[in-house]
Amino acid sequence: MEIVKLPIEKLNAAPYNPRIDLKPGDKDYEKLKKSILTFGYIDPIIVNKRGYVVVGGHQRQKQRQKQRDGSSVSYALKTTL
């Protein structure tokens, strides 16, 4: 495994993601948003090397896309699969 920087636009959400699609105003959505604003992005988004499919961190990916600060770089841990 390796940690690399990837443009957030390259990451693809997994269609089989079992998580509920959180929306602004949802308790968990706002909790994650507050945590990211307070502490930053601590955990990397985990993606598959083939197709950059997100296998972990779908909600962080959504937050990153919504809270863009002019930088298109996101940290991602790429698996070897």
Image (spheres, grey):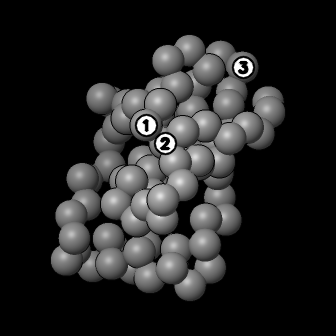
x%, y% of residue 4? 73, 37
- The type of residue carrying mark 1 is Glu
Q: Is 60 left or right of 28, judged from the image as shown?
A: right
Res 42 visible: yes
Q: Is residue 24 above or below residue 76?
A: below
Q: Foreground: 52 or 57? A: 52
Mark 3 — residue?
A: 80
Residue at the image position 41 percent from the left and 31 percent from the top: 12
Q: Are marks 2 and 1 in contact (CB under 8 Å)?
A: yes
Q: Is residue 44 above or below residue 51?
A: below
**In the structure shown, which secondary structural element does the residue marked by tag 1 occupy?**
helix
Which quarter of the rendered picture does the N terminus lie within? top right
Dot placed on the residue nearer the N-terminal end, 3 or 1? 1
x%, y% of residue 77? 69, 39
**In the structure shown, which secondary structural element does the residue marked by tag 3 occupy?**
loop
Spatial separation of the CA atoms under disc 2 and disc 3: 19 Å
Residue 24: which numbered mark, if any? none
Mark 1 — residue?
A: 9
Q: Is residue 46 above or below residue 30?
A: above
- The type of residue carrying mark 3 is Thr
x%, y% of residue 14? 38, 31
Q: Farthest residue toward the front?
A: 70
